[in-house]
Image: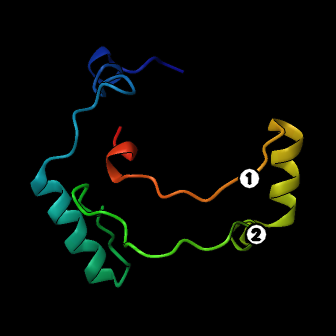
Amino acid sequence: MPEPPEDVVNAAPPPGDEPPPSEAFEAAMLTELRERGEPAFTVPSPEGEAPKGKLPPLDELVGRIPAETRQLLDELFRARFTEVRRVPTKALKG
């Protein structure tokens, strides 16, 4: 089997070197998703804080995690859930 020409081999940038998509590209993609009836999502603004109010009890939140997942977390990481805390949005920014 003959090898592809050099310009074809080097046509794509190496993984991780791609520039981020342009705003025009993203707008076109969202329009296409809407036309196909697929849900398009948006990332919430980092300025927006989580709703204030009382946090649910720890037992209720732990109960939402499937038993198999809780067991695996315990086996792999010895993870224990100890408290419910609200995390500021700024702390989640990368």
Q: Is residue 78 above or below residue 46?
A: above
Can you tell which quarter of the image residue 32 is in?
bottom left
Q: Residue at x 72, y 72 (%)?
A: 64
Q: Quadrant of residue 41?
A: bottom left
Residue shown at 12% from the left, 53% from the top: 23
Give percent across and percent down for residue 81: 74, 52
Q: Position of residue 79 (x, y in %)?
A: 78, 43
Q: Which mark is residue 31?
A: none
Q: Amino acid at mark 2?
A: Asp
Q: Secondary structure at mark 1?
A: loop
Question: Which residue has dot 2 on it?
Answer: 59
Residue 7, position as x, y percentages in the image: 26, 19
Q: Determine contact: label 1, label 2, CB under 8 Å.
A: no
In terms of secondary structure, where does tag 2 sit?
Answer: helix
Q: Which mark is first along the chain, 2 or 1? A: 2
Left or right of residue 81, residue 6 in this image? left
The picture quadrant where one finds residue 1 is top right
Determine crowd level at label 1: few under 14, some 14-19, many 20+ residues with C-alpha closer than 10 A. Answer: few
**Distance from Cα at disc 1 to Cα at disc 2:** 9 Å
In the depicted structure, whether residue 27 falls above or below residue 81: below
- Left or right, 80 with reference to 38: right
Of residues 49 and 12, the one drawn nearer to the viewer in this rendering: 49
State which quarter of the image contains the C terminus: top left
Three-letter amino acid code at the position of disc 1: Phe
Comparing 64 with 8, the one in front is 64
Looking at this view, name the residue that lies furthest to the front.
Answer: 54
Residue 14 sits above or below residue 83 on the image: above
Q: Which residue is mark 1?
A: 81
Q: Residue at x 50, y 75 (%)?
A: 54
- Position of residue 58 measured from the top left corner of the image (x, y, whole percent): 70, 66
